[in-house]
Image (spheres, rainbow, N blue to C red):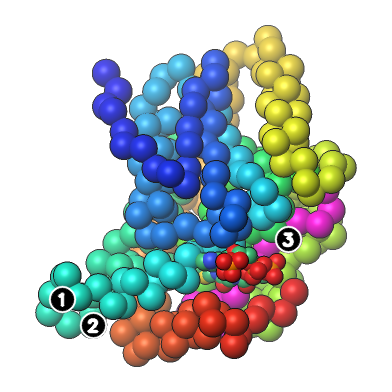
């Protein structure tokens, strides 16, 4: 028996045959997510995992961005949260950063269903890290990119990116982009087979793109023995699962000191007041 799950105004989900479809539905802030939203994503993945009728977990979004990553307003709120008395800065960021981050990353790393991402636009930060943990990625057009702006925000790699990015794009291409805060653009995503298909649709047509991907997937799974798909995912994942589990812990524990020292908070504040911008 599946447990009930709470609702979230920024993320919806529904089940259609073998597909568990998760959709980000807050396009006005480019689908930025707060800590609780990332936890909700993790909970949805657990729900999909436990449903034996589900074989594919599909991530979709709305508007012109897939997701602009962690919501800077949410981060400012965490800092000002007078309602909770933390024993120390370490205690505060263990709760507001480490626990949440490690949980959602782990939910993606251990997910047993085939993870499909419908990239309707760019993805940034932790959201882009989750995209890099997906098994299959389709793009709406060639304007999509992934940006991991950790060097601009006083952070270090998170969401398994220390493993996923070198694995999918090669170590040197990863160094160049992470160290100098440059995006992974469509060309490198294509060269490395990260994107399986470009649907060549206008950026304004996210809804039609999502529907088109689903239509193709329905056709593609016809006649397949779906437990074989999950059996193969398990084996393909076995190649890297130990590295992902290890790095998830190393990344969050490494980042903790940066949060305690305060540089990310200062830089998120500058981003929010538009004093700081990412180079795209
Ligand atoms: C968990 C902790 C660890 C951290 C992990 C990460 O994810 S690190 C990565 C963290 N993420 C980043 O570093 C990305 C920060 N964002 C950006 O750099 C730029 O917005 C952009 C390049 C994504 C798009 O530029 P553009 O000129 O095309 O569009 P625009 O700028 O005009 O934005 C439109 C509206 O959306 C709003 N909004 C956008 N993003 C966020 C957000 N994250 N939050 C809240 N709101 C956000 C923006 O304020 C504006 O609202 P307004 O003022 O109209 O009420």
Question: Could you tell me which secondary element the residue under label 2 belongs to?
Answer: helix
Q: Which residue is mark 3?
A: 145
Q: Is residue 202 left or right of residue 98?
A: right
Residue 96, image x, y percentages: 30, 68
Residue 71, image x, y percentages: 47, 65
Residue 38, image x, y percentages: 41, 53
First in sequence, mark 3 or 2: give its number: 2
Q: Are marks 2 and 1 in contact (CB under 8 Å)?
A: yes
Question: Could you tell me which secondary element the residue under label 1 belongs to?
Answer: loop
Q: Which residue is mark 2?
A: 89
Q: Nearer the viewer, residue 196 or 42?
A: 42
Q: Is residue 236 above or below residue 151?
A: above
Give the Cα separation between the discs numbered 3 and 2.
34 Å
* Residue depicted at 77% across the width and 41% down the height: 205
Is the residue indicated by label 1 positioned so its CB lies within 8 Å of ligand 1? Answer: no
Residue 221: image quadrant is: top right
Q: Is residue 46 left or right of residue 84?
A: right
Q: Is residue 119 left or right of residue 9?
A: right
Asked whether 148 falls inside the magenta stretch, the response is yes
Provide the residue span drawn in magenta.
Answer: 141-156
First in sequence, mark 3 or 1: give its number: 1
Is the residue indicated by label 3 positioned so its CB lies within 8 Å of ligand 1? Answer: no
């Amino acid at each position: 028996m599946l447990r009930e799950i709470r609702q979230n105004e920024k993320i919806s989900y529904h089940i259609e045959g073998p597909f568990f479809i998760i959709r980000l539905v807050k396009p006005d802030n480019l689908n930025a997510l707060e800590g609780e939203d990332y936890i909700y994503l993790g909970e949805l993945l657990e729900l999909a995992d436990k449903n034996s009728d589900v074989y594919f977990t599909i991530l979709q979004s709305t508007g012109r961005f897939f997701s602009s990553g962690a919501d800077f307003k949410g981060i400012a709120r965490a800092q000002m949260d007078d309602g909770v008395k933390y024993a120390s800065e370490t205690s505060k960021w263990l709760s507001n950063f480490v626990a949440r981050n490690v949980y959602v990353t782990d939910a993606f790393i251990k997910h047993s269903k085939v993870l499909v991402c419908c990239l309707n636009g760019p993805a940034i930060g932790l959201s882009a890290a989750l995209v890099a943990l997906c098994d299959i990625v389709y793009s709406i057009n060639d304007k999509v990119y992934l940006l991991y702006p950790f060097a601009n925000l006083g952070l270090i790699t998170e969401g398994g990116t220390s493993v996923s990015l070198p694995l999918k794009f090669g170590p040197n291409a990863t160094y160049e982009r992470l160290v100098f805060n440059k995006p992974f653009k469509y060309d490198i995503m294509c060269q490395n087979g990260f994107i399986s298909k470009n649907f060549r649709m206008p950026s304004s047509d996210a809804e039609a793109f999502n529907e088109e991907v689903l239509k193709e997937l329905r056709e593609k799974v016809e006649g397949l023995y779906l437990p074989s798909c999950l059996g193969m995912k398990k084996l393909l994942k076995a190649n890297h699962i130990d590295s992902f589990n290890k790095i998830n812990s190393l990344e969050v524990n490494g980042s903790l000191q940066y949060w305690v020292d305060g540089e990310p908070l200062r830089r998120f504040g500058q981003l929010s007041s538009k004093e700081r911008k990412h180079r795209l």
